[in-house]
């Protein structure tokens, strides 16, 4: 991690990822980028559905290929690049048929490395193969939930899932949250773990850096009035006055409380629930 001279109080504890040592270019592939309008946590009616989002630095969208559906066509890594829209790095792949695509870069990927998407591809980082052909104990990322549905799981910096068993038409994966989940064995997954695994060590250091990222301030519920939050009210500083923490709308929140939808479609696929709270 890169640290800074303590020229100001906020600079003293600030750290960042040393991008110059990890990336190979700062100019994206123009044909794979375009402008877009960020939603800032609003729905199609313009109403806020996710609080604390808005502003931030202007970004260009990188068209990342999460399906990686070019079967049995070898490709070569041409560059490892920064993507402002995700925490992991992306890699530009040039395929033998002349096509170029961005993929989510795995840890330890190098320029010039060859990759391939095939049902029985070699077990080298960035190669993509069917889950049923992945040996037990292998780390995978960019995992599909449904076959040919595109990668949905294990896509953020440093994340991976571990294949712990093969059970008929399902593969058992231990997720980053410690949950054990069944995923269809005909779904595709990439070998390795997502790049930029030091991201969680980054210390923003000052409020302005959060605003650059599009993160707006969060007000504690205990600092509000009773009309605004279940934790609000009281003379001076008060505890929340409740046994368990609640959200602004009275729903359970905080460590150790179950917040999963009771009738969620994927409940039948969960073998072991995630571990939460201090015991984890």
Image: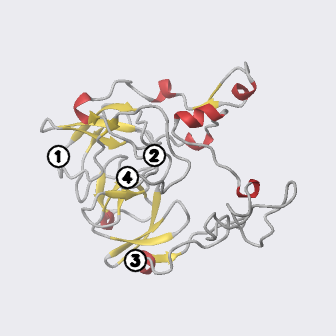
The C terminus lies in which quarter of the figure?
bottom right
Q: Which mark is residue 191?
A: 4
The N terminus lies in which quarter of the figure?
top right
What residue is rendered at 37% in x and 58% in y? Answer: 152
Residue corresponding to mark 2 = 40
- Position of residue 242 measured from the top left corner of the image (x, y, whole percent): 77, 71
Q: Secondary structure at mark 2?
A: loop
User: Which one is closest to the eye, mark 1 or mark 2?
Assistant: 2
Q: Earlier in the sequence, mark 1 or mark 4?
A: 1
Pick the residue in front: 233 or 209. 233
Q: Residues within 10 Å of mark 3 (few under 14, many from 20)?
A: few
Residue corresponding to mark 1 = 73
Q: Which mark is residue 265?
A: 3
Q: Secondary structure at mark 1?
A: loop
278 left or right of 150 in image = right
35 left or right of 72 in image = right
Q: CA distance from mark 1 to mark 3?
A: 35 Å
Q: Which mark is residue 158?
A: none
Q: Earlier in the sequence, mark 2 or mark 3?
A: 2
Q: Secondary structure at mark 4?
A: strand
- Position of residue 117 measured from the top left corner of the image (x, y, whole percent): 24, 51
Q: Residues within 10 Å of mark 4 (few under 14, many from 20)?
A: many
Q: CA distance from mark 1 to mark 4?
A: 17 Å
């Amino acid at each position: 991690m890169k640290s800074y001279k303590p020229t100001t109080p906020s600079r003293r504890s600030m750290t960042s990822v040393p991008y110059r040592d990890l990336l190979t270019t700062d100019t994206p592939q123009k044909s794979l980028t375009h402008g877009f309008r960020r939603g800032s946590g609003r729905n199609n009616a313009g109403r806020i559905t996710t609080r604390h989002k808005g502003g931030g630095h202007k970004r260009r969208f990188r068209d990342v290929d999460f399906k990686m559906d070019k079967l049995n066509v070898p490709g070569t890594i041409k560059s490892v690049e920064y993507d402002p829209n995700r925490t992991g790095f992306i890699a530009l792949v040039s395929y033998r048929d002349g096509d170029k695509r961005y993929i989510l870069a795995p840890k330890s990927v190098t320029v010039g490395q060859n990759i391939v998407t095939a049902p029985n591809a070699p077990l080298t980082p960035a190669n993509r193969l069917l889950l049923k052909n992945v040996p037990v104990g292998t780390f995978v990322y960019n995992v599909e939930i449904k076959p040919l549905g595109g990668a949905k799981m294990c896509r953020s910096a440093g994340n991976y899932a571990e294949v712990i068993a093969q059970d008929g038409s399902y593969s058992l994966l231990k997720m980053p949250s410690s949950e054990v989940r069944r995923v269809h064995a005909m779904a595709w997954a990439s070998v390795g773990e997502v790049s930029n695994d030091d991201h969680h060590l980054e210390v923003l250091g000052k409020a302005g850096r959060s605003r650059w990222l599009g993160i707006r301030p969060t007000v504690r519920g205990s600092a509000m009035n009773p009309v605004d939050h279940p934790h609000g009210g009281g003379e001076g500083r008060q505890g929340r006055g409740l046994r368990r923490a609640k959200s602004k709308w009275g729903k359970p929140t905080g460590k150790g409380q179950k917040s999963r939808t009771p009738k969620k479609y994927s409940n039948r696929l969960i073998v072991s629930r995630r571990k939460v709270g201090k015991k984890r």
